[in-house]
């Protein structure tokens, strides 16, 4: 799997930044955590996009295809795609444009909304999702250095941030499964 260009520094630049931060502004574990999360995002996105490049996909396009694959009919309104992927409508339009050019989706008029548009996954789109998912799963989405329990802990810790931001209310599916079933 391709990595972003290694920094190969003889020190941790985020730890160094945190030391400088403390000297100038005071201690801030939050600054170091945020900077680490942002760097982790860069690393993971680079790795995942590299894995998906042979399929003419980015991770954002892959997520849209997976969402369509999970839908009952294989088609969703563009507004629903944006809502579920938590992205701006302009980003959805751009993503669907690229997927349509690759032959992975087609646009259809929304029968429930005369002005709306549906994106529908094609057979080619379903094939590429299966193949790309195999590669992502084999690479453990770039997180091979973590044990399963650490990944669950990471998910749980980041969920706290997402709840505080208002992403959702109520228990997650995983929490609900622990209490006897799906809602």
Image (cartoon, rainbow, N blue to C red):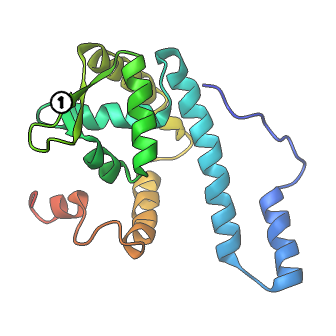
Q: Secondary structure at mark 1?
A: loop
Mark 1: few/some/many CA within 10 Å (<14, 14-19, 20+): some
Please say if 159 is above or below 7.
below
Which quadrant does the N terminus fall into? top right
Q: How many marks?
A: 1
Label 1 sits on residue: 74
Where is the C terminus found, in terms of image quarters?
Answer: bottom left
Where residue 35 sits in the image (x, y, percent)?
Answer: 69, 62
Q: Position of residue 149 (x, y in %)?
A: 41, 54
Q: Residue at x 41, y 28 (%)?
A: 97
Q: In the image, is 50 to the left or to the right of 120?
A: right
The residue lying toward the viewer, choosing from 29 and 57, is 57
Res 136 quadrant in image: top left
Q: Residue at the spot x=25%, y=34% of the render? A: 68
Q: Is residue 20 above or below residue 137?
A: below
Q: Against 147, is 158 above or below?
A: below
Q: Nearer the viewer, residue 99 or 67?
A: 99
| Left or right for 182, reference 155 | left
Q: Identify which residue is drawn at 40% across, 38% down.
A: 93
User: Please, which residue is most extreme toward the bottom here?
Assistant: 26
Residue at 45% from the left image edge and 66% from the top image edge: 157
**Horizontal side, residue 18 vs residue 110: left or right:** right
Residue 99 locus on image (x, y percent): 39, 25
Coordinates of residue 172 in the picture (x, y in percent)? 25, 62
């Amino acid at each position: 799997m391709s990595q972003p260009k290694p920094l190969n520094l003889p020190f941790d630049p985020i730890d160094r930044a945190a030391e400088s931060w403390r000297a100038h502004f005071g201690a801030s574990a939050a600054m170091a955590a945020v900077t680490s999360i942002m760097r982790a995002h860069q690393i993971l996105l680079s790795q995942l996009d590299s894995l998906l490049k042979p399929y003419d996909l980015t991770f954002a396009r892959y997520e849209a295809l997976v969402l369509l694959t999970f839908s009952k009919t294989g088609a969703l309104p563009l507004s629903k795609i944006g809502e579920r992927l938590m992205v701006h409508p302009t980003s959805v339009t751009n993503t669907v444009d690229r997927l349509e050019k690759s032959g992975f989706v087609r646009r259809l008029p929304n029968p429930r909304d005369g002005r709306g548009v549906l994106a529908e996954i094609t057979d080619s789109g379903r094939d590429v999702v299966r193949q790309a998912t195999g590669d992502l799963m084999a690479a453990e989405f770039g997180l091979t250095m973590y044990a399963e329990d650490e990944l669950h802990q990471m998910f749980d810790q980041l969920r706290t941030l997402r709840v505080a931001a208002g992403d959702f209310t109520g228990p997650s599916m995983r929490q609900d499964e622990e209490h006897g079933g799906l809602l």
